[in-house]
Image (cartoon, rainbow, N blue to C red):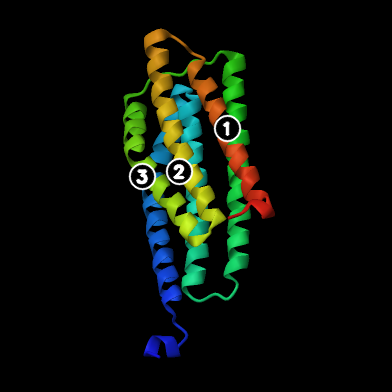
Amino acid sequence: MNVEERHGITKETKTRRTLLLRGLRLEYLSLGWNGIAGTTAVVIGLSTASSALLGFGLDVAIDSLASLLLVWRFWQEVRGHSSSAQLEQQATRSVGVTLLAAGCYLAAQAAHALLTHAASGTSTVGVSLAILSLCLLPPLAYGKIRLASQLSSGALRGDGVLTAVGACLAAVTLLGLLVNTLLGWWWADPLAALLITAVLLREGWHALQPSQRT
């Protein structure tokens, strides 16, 4: 028996600690990008009346909250907190609530835009932000969801879904802005944003079901 084993540090413990630290790095990366993208998206979304762009900014803000929850949850386990299972349940429930909140808010905004025939404007900054997000968010979402499977973390999976939805909203925003500009289809932006809410609501409900958490 080596020194590490005598102190209760097994190979499995070291492997899990490595995975937790990897998760922390992913969450720090999310927080850094979200701080820039979220603020920009909300400001431009409000100024151009773009439901999809505003929804993207909202998703980013919620994703930031989920990332903060995951940072707290992972650090607690890294520091040897004995109730890691309870921490995981608390974090998963919190992420589930944020997913549902984001879905309901985005649905309301999109429905309002459809009912009032509110056409979104076009912004060069918004288009650039959507393109950058399409480059950065898919691999980040994949990394989170893959790591969630390795850690059996429903909370991290929910956060990964939020990041993936952010990528989808970036695509929706870009397509909506272009279609509205080129074809005058004012309804494309809010309709696409409304469809995305189904994913948020489904994953939020999934996260809140004890028997479904992974």
Q: In which quadrant is the C terminus drawn?
A: bottom right
Q: Is the residue 154 above or below the residue 98 in the image?
A: below
Amino acid of disc 1 = Thr
Name the residue rendered at 38%, 47% in the picture: 140
**On the image, numbered disc 1 is attached to which residue?**
197
Q: Residues within 10 Å of mark 1 (few under 14, many from 20)?
A: many
Q: Can residue 101 be seen here?
A: no
Would residue 175 be found to the left or right of residue 119 on screen?
Answer: left
Name the residue rendered at 51%, 51% in the picture: 157
Q: Residues within 10 Å of mark 3 (few under 14, many from 20)?
A: some
Q: In which quadrant is the N terminus drawn?
A: bottom left
**On the image, numbered disc 2 is attached to which residue?**
163
Q: Is the residue 178 above or below the residue 165 in the image?
A: above
Residue 194 spot, x, y in % from top left: 56, 26
Q: Can residue 82 be seen here?
A: yes
Would residue 182 be found to the left or right of residue 159 on screen?
Answer: left
User: Residue reaching furthest right?
Assistant: 210
Q: Secondary structure at mark 2?
A: helix
**On the image, numbered disc 3 is attached to which residue?**
139
Would residue 97 be found to the left or right of residue 131 on screen?
Answer: right
